[in-house]
Structures are given as structure tokens and as C-alpha cells.
Amino acid sequence: MSKDSSAAQAASRQNARGLAYLNEGRFKPAAERFRRALQQDPDDADVLANLANAYVGLGQLDAAVAVLRRALSLAPEDPVLHNNLGGALLEIGDAAGAVACLKRATALAPGHADYHTALGNALHAAGDPAAALAAYEASLRCRPGNAFALAFKGIVLTERGALAQAHALLDEQRHIRRITIEAPEGYPDLDAFNAALAAHVLAHPTLVRDRPRRATKGGSVAGNLLTEPKGPIADLEQIVLAEATRYLEALPPDPADPMAAGCPSGVELVMWGTVLTSGGYQASHNHPNGWLSGVYYPKVPPEIDGRDEARAGWIRFGPPPPEISTAGGFQTIDIAVHEGLLLLFPSYAWHGTLPFESAEPRISIAFDLSPPAER
């Protein structure tokens, strides 16, 4: 084996290990592996892009920008690199630089919906709402159900005073489904099923407190619960799939309805758990990779009460986080949660929870039904 071949194989192994760490959200060891790979081949644009992703995960945005610029000097026609650099620049506050990068990404890959959405976000940050709206519309022409584009389209419509159009994106009666499930076969009652689900989440090996760059504040998140052993999650999976089918069948045949227009031909289910403790909450967010999302509640503290005027622990749909927009006019839909409640809603809907106080945890199991990933 030649020295060059041996070095290439060593770099490939380091990169593969780095990607495994990256997929687990372990950004520090991922970055170290990518740096080791680059010691063997400093001109590998793909590894540089991976290193930049690790730096973004670590919050080292300036380092990510520098690495992406290096990668683009090696692969100047790569739309992924232009898109990633645009996203990093936007995070550090360089909206004009982000717009330039993302215009190049959309020019190189005009059929990629997510690049148009990212361009819309940069244009919005740069103070050009009309151009931002046009970018979101371009994204939706590429993929009608693009959740991120719909989420930010609603923000721009609200800011421009088009409240009827904005509010039509999330119609409470049409788009939000409340279901109180029954215990699946094999459980004496719903309480037993809920106890099994709660115990499974609390014991899950991926449960981590205060994951960085997540909406969860004052709580823990477990990773994909659909990995084996699923335990009682397997029963919840079947319930979710059955209710999602009913949701789909109830959609009106209206091409103007964003959920009907964006219904994918196939979906993949992802499910994760959240454990909030006293004072914890979910910041307003959406699920950009999904089409239909939802949440099930196996454990709700007694202090969370549907008659509570303060609505502590409730789920709230409507306003985006204040760092994105502080405009008035956003509709607000508050829903009291209880054990046994399954909620289904569009993935583009901004939603979060209100803080609560209790000695007991609030445990929820969230999920996305997502179209196949765009390549």
C-alpha cells in the first residue's frame, strides 16, 4: 500500500468517526476527528464542510465561517457550501453577506426548496420583507409543504398586516386535532400504558439535560425513541400512524390549504421524549423537516389544570420567538394538556409551552411525520 493510499484511508476513517459523533450531537469529539482527517488531506472540501457543521454545533460561528470560506475556495460551485456559509453569516449578524451567499446557492440549485427558504430568512433579516416573501413562495413552488417556508411566510404576512392570510395557515378547527387515546391491547388501562411510557422515557440512554441549541429550557430530551428496544413506544407508534391516517383522510381537497397541498407521497416517523421540570418550558419553535407533527402526554403534574387562568404548562400555538419577530397580530391558540392527550398539528406551526411549577415532571413524547429528505 502506498503512503498516499494509507493517508487517504486514515483520513476517511477519521471523517467517518467524526460523522458518527456529529449525528449523535457530540460536536467536540466530532470536530477533533475532522481536524485529524484534515491533517492527512487539508484540501478535502467535504471534510471542511463537516468541520464547519461541528463548529456551528459548538457555537463557534466565526470558526465555522472561516472553514466554509476555505472549503469554497476549493469548491466554488458547491451550492451546499454557499448555503451553509449563508446560514453561518446570518447567525453572526451579517445579513447582507448571507443574502449574497444564499442568492448564489439558489442560482446553483434553483430547485432546492430549503435554499430559497434560507434566502428568505436572510432577506427578512436584511429588512426586505417583499423579497423575503417572494423567496418563500419560490420555496413552496419547489416543495409545497415546506414547513420552514410556511412558518416564515406567516411571520412576513403578519408583519405586513395581511392577518387573514397569516391566520389561515393555522386554522384551529381544520389543522389542530385533539385525541384522547384508549389503552392499547396488553395494558389493563390507560394509566398503566402512560406509566410504562413515562418510565421508558426517563430510563432512555439518550436522555440529556439542557441540550444545546434546542427549544427545551429547564428539562431533558431523549433522542429517537423508535430505536430498539422500543418497549411501549411500539404501541404508541401504531396509534400515531393510525391517527395520522385519519388526519390525512379528513383534509379538505383544497389546493389552497397548505396541509393538503403539501401532503407528501410518503413519510418517515421520528419520535423523541421531553422531560420538563419545575420552571421548565419549550421556547417557541417549529419542526422544519416535518409535514405533520404532534405530541402525546403520558405524565402531566396535577398543578397543570385546564381551569388555570395563568395556563401554566399549557401548549401555545402562534407567536414566533421574540428574537425573530416582535410584531403584533400573531394569533394565539392555548391548549390545556392532560394525560392521555394526543395532539396533531402542522409542522410549520410555531408552538411552545408555558412554564409551570411542580415537584413532578411534565413528560411528553413528540413526533414528526416527515417527507423523505431532500438531496
Image (spheres, rainbow, N blue to C red):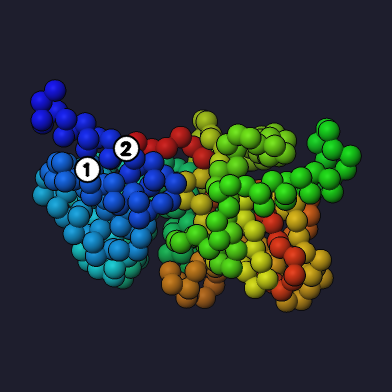
Q: Quadrant of the C terminus?
A: top left
In the image, is 188 to the left or to the right of 146? right
Image coords of residue 345 (percent x, y): 62, 50
Residue plotted at (28% across, 60% down): 88
The secondary structure type at the circle numbered 2 is: helix
The residue that mark 2 highlights is 16
Tell me if label 2 and label 1 are in contact, CB under 8 Å: no
Image coords of residue 199 (percent x, y): 72, 49
In the image, is 212 to the left or to the right of 116? right
Image coords of residue 109 (percent x, y): 25, 41
Q: Quadrant of the N terminus?
A: top left
Image coords of residue 92 (percent x, y): 29, 68
Residue type at numbered disc 1? Ala
Residue type at numbered disc 2? Ala
The residue that mark 1 highlights is 37
The secondary structure type at the circle numbered 1 is: helix
The earlier-in-sequence mark between 2 and 1 is 2
Q: Nearer the viewer, residue 203 or 71?
A: 203
Residue plotted at (30% across, 52% down): 31
Label number found at residue 161? none
Residue plotted at (58% across, 47% down): 205
